[in-house]
Amino acid sequence: MQALFAEHPLFCFAAVGLFGLIVGSFLNVVILRLPRMMQAEWRASAAEILGQPVAVSTRPRMSLSQPRSTCGHCRTPIKARHNIPVLSFLLLRGRCANCNHPISLQYPAIELFSAVLALVVLATFGALPFTLFALVFTWTLLAAAMIDWHTQFLPDALSLPLLWLGLLISLGHDAGYALVDPATAIIGAAAGYLILWFVFQAFRLVTGKEGMGYGDFKLLAVIGAWLGWQALPMVLLMASLAGAIVGGALMATGTLERGKPMPFGPWLAIAGWLALVAGDTISGAYLSLAGLR
């Protein structure tokens, strides 16, 4: 793999970029369907606990693969040739081929982001064993961030597998499969969860309100497991600053009402990814600006 990357770097970047577009198309499905699937499960579980009849739908049960994708407006199944990442959106001029209704820009944007982020990961780590895992980390964070932005919910179906994967690959640290060793990963996961748990409890004690959800604790635990406890202060600082700046801008423009909650997960995901690909650069710049280096 390293020899192929050294001899044909452009081919490797093109292959990873193309694969990133395909993964981005799948991430769009995850972002749209996973919250709906979980809501359906919650309703069924709640009805069973309360002893109420479970509503029977005539539609096929939704999964990540079934039923086929359809236009959100006219419900016409999308043909394979109209589902090519980015290219189909451009050829269709951003409109449904059947009803001419505008297609959300989120679909090509996620596909492009998926590809660009993958290329940055490849450029950062090269053809190392860890690169494949870094791509999984990147794409899962992207899906989780978008779901949290739309629903203010971080699915355990994304966070927990990523947490366990981070802990498991730390066993291969000496062979280049992880950035941190097992002890650092375990401490990072525990510290990531407990830091926000303590913040949550303190905020609730002082205000009587819940300032964040348990999904945020788990997401920071994921970042701690992958990057180690040493990265947590930088991640929290970047996420808090980004959230404060964007939240303030949204309130200033009237987009976000004062007192209305804004998800913290997207900023944790962004900060965690930046720490992955540029943690040393960011910390070095901070120390230089602070006159500590």
Image (cartoon, rainbow, N blue to C red):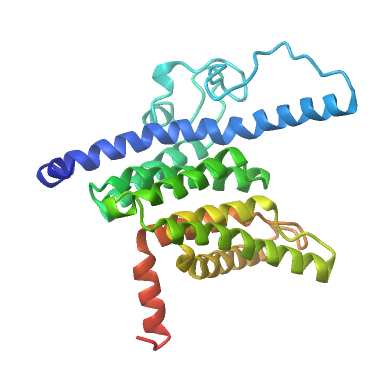
Q: Residue 45, how many percent across, how many down?
A: 78, 28
Q: Does 119 sit left or right of 219 as displayed? A: left
Residue furthest left as drawn: 7
Q: Quadrant of the N terminus?
A: top left
Residue furthest top as drawn: 58
The answer to which quarter of the image holds residue 292 is bottom left
Q: Residue 171, how many percent across, how many down?
A: 38, 50
Q: Quadrant of the C terminus?
A: bottom left
Look at 80% across and 64% down and name the residue there: 204
Look at 36% across and 57% down and name the residue there: 179
Labels in figure, total: 0
- Is residue 266 visible in the rendered image? The answer is no
Decide which of 193, 27 is in the foreground and name it: 193
Look at 60% across and 52% down and name the residue there: 218
Q: Does 61 sit left or right of 132 as displayed? A: right
Q: Residue 265, how many percent across, how many down?
A: 59, 53
Decide which of 99, 137 is in the foreground and name it: 137
Look at 85% across and 28% down and name the residue there: 49
Q: Does 95 sit left or right of 285 as displayed? A: right
The answer to which quarter of the image holds residue 48 is top right
Q: Residue 270, how many percent across, how many down?
A: 49, 56
Residue furthest right as drawn: 51
Decide which of 173, 278 is in the foreground and name it: 173
Residue furthest bottom as drawn: 291
- Is residue 23 visible in the rendered image? The answer is yes
In the picture shown, does residue 198 fall above or below 261?
below
In the picture shown, does residue 19 fall above or below 72?
below
